[in-house]
Image (tube, rainbow, N blue to C red):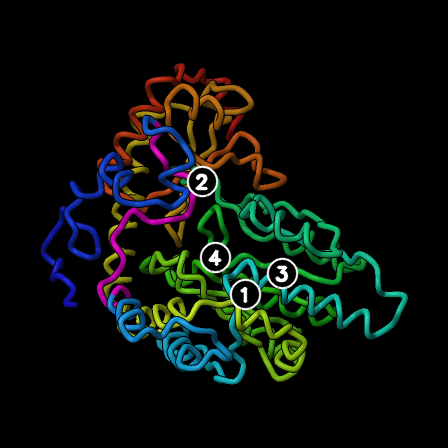
């Protein structure tokens, strides 16, 4: 299968598929994921983190080749995915990943849960008195799935809201509150769940921030799980810094959970990696149950190999289109959505919108869904600091973004200066 040359196709997605073929009404007749089945046909679905873009031809072919070979059995190790990921990590981020440090999991959610279960077990083994619910620090607002994952585990969540920093032309920038994180560690937190880049804001943490987090984690013996699933989608001009090398240098115990699922739009392929930061973390991952590996999909493994090795040009085109869509949304928010503020994103295709000054009341998500018929994510589900916000998916045809904004604009009252000023 040969990928279309779409370098000179401004009206096509990264695979060369015309944007007209990504009309949501048409996609509903072709796709069966929850994005297209959860809501009635008159609702524009821009909630779940799933691209409308066609999957890269190289990835499609890798899956077809495995099916043609009847190679759809169980897995026993990361196999070719380990060097494929390591080569990509080295090229993209300068991260030297030993192949033996790469372990399989079904998806990043499984990687997070099983890694934290290992962390809890290590403390339990250190002393019976530690076999109690432990405390995990979670910077919020953050991906709602984290709260659901942690329900499976003996952890009490300590929410530490992000810190408002500089004002931008479109909205406030938020970053890790390292002072508050340090206080939480001093009060005995045992684990930290790092979302890097941060979802929903699209914030890429700096090397200085992550270095200090690693130092604090080592000082207080905090186990860090870094979810870096959105890292391949870092925008041009921004440097993504993997946490693992910094953790290893600082002496902090840490693992990274990641997958090509977001970067290459293959979440349903169900294969991710858990990467140990160093030998000590790798020894800890020896406690993972064998099912963590065998439940991963062999189709997803080979799709991941193709993505990391041969899908980099497709990814570059996807990022370019996402950046264009981000600029489009920024313009539309400024001109069509009075009182709405947009967080500045440095990665990913998820836009974080502050509707507190838009006049839709305390639950803008419900008003937008019921009155504008646009399905977004409810900011209230993202933890402290999320109420009054929504998350919008930008990985679609530009016309879909236009349509969503026009629907929302139609239900907005004119924001009063007082209300708008309060939101700032």
Residue 58 is one of the magenta-drawn residues: yes
* Percent position of residue 265, x then y: 35, 56
Q: Answer with mark 1 or mark 2, whichever residue precedes in sequence.
A: 1
* Label 3 environment density (alpha carbons within 10 Å; few <14, some 14–19, many ≥20): some
Q: Residue at left 62%, top 84%?
A: 279
Label 1 Cα neighbours within 10 Å, binned few <14 / some 14-19 / many ≥20? few
Q: Mark 2 points at which residue?
A: 352
Other-residue count near label 2 (Cα within 10 Å), few / some / many at <14 / 14–19 / ≥20? many
User: What's the magenta region?
Assistant: 43-60
Marks 1 and 2, Cα distance to the nearest angstrom? 24 Å
Q: What element carries label 4?
A: loop
* Chain-order first, disc 4 or disc 2: 4
Per the model, the C-alpha gap separating discs 3 and 4 is 19 Å
**Viewer-nearest of labels 4 and 1?**
4
The residues tagged by marks 4 and 1 sit, at their Cα atoms, a distance apart of 15 Å
Q: Mark 4 points at which residue?
A: 197
Q: What element carries label 2?
A: strand
Residue hosting label 3: 113
Disc 1 vs disc 3: which is toward the camera?
3
Please give the residue where the numbered disc 1 appears in the rendered image. Answer: 208
**Residue at the (37%, 42%) spot, across then down:** 393
Identify the image quadrant of residue 220: bottom right
């Amino acid at each position: 299968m040969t990928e279309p040359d779409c370098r000179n196709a401004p009206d096509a997605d990264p695979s060369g598929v015309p944007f007209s073929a990504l009309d949501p009404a048409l996609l509903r007749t072709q796709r069966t994921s929850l994005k297209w089945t959860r809501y009635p046909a008159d609702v524009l679905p821009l909630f779940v983190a799933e691209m409308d873009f066609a999957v890269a031809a190289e990835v499609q072919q890798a899956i077809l080749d495995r099916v043609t070979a009847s190679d759809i059995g169980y897995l026993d190790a990361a196999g070719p995915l380990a060097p494929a990921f390591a080569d990509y990590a080295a090229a993209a981020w300068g991260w030297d990943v030993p192949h033996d440090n790469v372990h399989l999991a079904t998806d990043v959610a499984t990687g997070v849960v099983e890694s934290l279960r290992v962390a809890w077990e290590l403390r339990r083994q250190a002393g019976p008195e530690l076999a109690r619910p432990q405390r995990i620090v979670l910077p919020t607002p953050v991906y709602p799935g984290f709260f659901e994952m942690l329900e499976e585990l003996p952890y009490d969540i300590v929410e530490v809201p992000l810190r408002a920093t500089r004002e931008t032309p479109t909205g406030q920038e938020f970053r890790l509150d390292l002072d508050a994180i340090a206080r939480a560690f001093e009060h005995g937190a045992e684990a930290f769940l790092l979302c890097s880049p941060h979802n929903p804001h699209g914030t890429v943490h700096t090397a200085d921030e992550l270095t200090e987090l690693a130092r604090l984690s080592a000082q207080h013996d905090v186990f860090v799980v870094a979810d870096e699933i959105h890292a391949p989608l870092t925008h041009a001009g921004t440097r993504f810094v993997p946490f693992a090398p910094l953790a290893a240098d600082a002496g902090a115990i840490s693992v990274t959970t990641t997958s090509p699922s977001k970067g290459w739009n293959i979440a349903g392929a169900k294969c991710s990696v858990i990467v140990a930061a160093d030998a000590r973390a790798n020894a800890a991952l020896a406690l993972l149950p064998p099912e963590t590996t065998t439940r991963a999909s062999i189709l997803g493994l080979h799709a991941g190999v193709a993505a990391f090795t041969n899908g980099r040009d497709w990814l570059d085109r996807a990022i370019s289109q996402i950046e264009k869509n981000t600029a489009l949304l920024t313009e539309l928010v400024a001109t069509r959505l009075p009182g709405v503020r947009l967080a500045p994103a440095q990665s990913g295709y998820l836009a974080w919108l502050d509707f507190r000054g838009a006049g839709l009341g305390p639950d803008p998500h419900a008003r937008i869904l019921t009155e504008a018929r646009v399905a977004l994510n409810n900011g209230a589900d993202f933890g402290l600091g999320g109420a009054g916000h929504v998350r919008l998916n930008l990985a679609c045809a530009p016309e879909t973004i236009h349509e969503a904004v026009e629907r929302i604009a139609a239900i907005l009252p004119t924001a009063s200066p007082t209300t708008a000023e309060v939101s700032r």
